[in-house]
Image: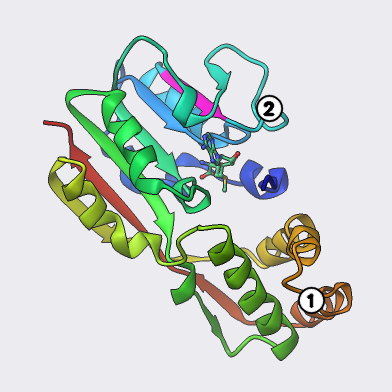
């Protein structure tokens, strides 16, 4: 089942703000593969530091038509080289076999290089004060829809174990919770809401009510994320 990440959300991302643990690993000459680069906003930030960054994404409608960007699914990517750092930010949450994707990322990392994954534990997201009931209804439907597609709603909390099982060494995982920009869930409801409706997890009316409910909500939305870093043996 295909769906698309919202380009408005992706274009707002920056390396320093939205993938901050990666920054410490970058310096000129370090080669980086950014898996699931979307519109390439973070990849460009990486390239500005290292001079060597490749972004890949399976969604051709998002990937910039420029050198250094490749339309490819991680499972099909065979560049014939390895990278000093292979990263995936907010990507494995959309893959039903994240362990296999991680194994592919490890293969693409040179021995002694690093794998860096930043991802969500959606079930731990919080709204303060409580979000309106109409939005909570959407939120529960969204989580059920994700689960039905095999996407892990607590992936971030499993990263450390997955890294160890993939044979990565010196694994460090840190909490990197974010306060979501006000418009984030409006964008998500706009782009993914119709897919959740189409797949039978929500009605159109309930989606509309959730959008109205959230538009009137002025609270803070905390997203639960973690970053895991490990060294390839
Ligand atoms: C939420 S976006 C994250 C974009 C960017 N990394 C960021 O943090 O802003 C997730 C991206 O992963 C891509 N993606 C999902 N599964 C993929 C796969 N199997 N291979 C390559 N890209 C994938 C999607 O197309 C989407 O662009």
- Which quadrant is home to the C terminus? top left
Q: Is residue 26 above or below residue 185?
A: above
Checking the image for residue 215, the label placed there is: 1
**Residue at image location 73% in from the left, 64% down from the top:** 196
In which quarter of the view is residue 218 placed? bottom right
Question: Which quadrant contains ligand 1?
Answer: top right
The x, y position of residue 178, in whole percent, is 47, 64
Q: Are marks 2 and 1 in contact (CB under 8 Å)?
A: no
Is residue 56 part of the magenta span, yes or no?
Answer: yes
Q: Is residue 157 left or right of residue 142?
A: left
Q: Is residue 193 above or below residue 119?
A: below
Dominant SS in magenta: strand
Secondary structure under tag 2 reads loop
Q: Is residue 217 above or below residue 165?
A: below
Density class for disc 2 (Cα within 10 Å; few <14, some 14-19, many ≥20) is: some
Density class for disc 1 (Cα within 10 Å; few <14, some 14-19, many ≥20) is: some
In which quarter of the view is residue 201 placed? bottom right
**Residue at image location 70% in from the left, 60% down from the top:** 188
Is residue 168 part of the magenta span, yes or no?
Answer: no
Residue matched to label 2: 60
The x, y position of residue 24, in whole percent, is 27, 39
Q: Is residue 170 left or right of residue 118?
A: left
Report the front residue among 159 and 131: 159
The x, y position of residue 170, in whole percent, is 11, 45
**Residue at image location 66% in from the left, 47% down from the top:** 5
What stretch of residues is rendered in magenta? 53-57
């Amino acid at each position: 089942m295909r769906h698309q990440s919202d380009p408005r959300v992706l274009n707002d991302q920056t390396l320093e703000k939205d993938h901050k643990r990666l920054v410490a690993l970058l310096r000129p000459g370090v080669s980086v593969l950014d898996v699931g680069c979307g519109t390439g906003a973070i990849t460009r930030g990486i390239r500005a530091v290292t001079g060597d960054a490749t972004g890949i994404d399976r969604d051709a409608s998002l990937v910039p038509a420029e050198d250094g960007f490749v339309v490819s699914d991680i499972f099909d990517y065979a560049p014939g080289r390895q990278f000093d750092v292979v990263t995936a930010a907010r990507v494995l949450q959309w893959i039903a076999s994240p362990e296999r994707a991680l194994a592919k990322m490890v293969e693409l990392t040179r021995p002694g290089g690093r794998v860096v994954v930043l991802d969500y534990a959606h079930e731990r997201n919080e709204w303060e004060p409580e979000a309106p009931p109409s939005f909570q209804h959407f939120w529960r439907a969204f989580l059920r829809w994700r689960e039905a597609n095999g996407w892990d709603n607590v992936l971030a909390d499993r990263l450390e174990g997955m890294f160890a099982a993939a044979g990565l060494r010196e694994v460090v995982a840190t909490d990197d919770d974010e306060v979501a920009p006000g418009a984030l869930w409006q964008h998500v409801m706009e782009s993914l809401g119709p897919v959740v409706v189409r797949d039978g997890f929500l009605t159109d009316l309930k989606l509309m009510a959730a959008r109205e409910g959230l538009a009137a909500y002025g609270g803070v939305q905390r997203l639960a994320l973690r970053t895991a870093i490990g060294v390839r043996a």
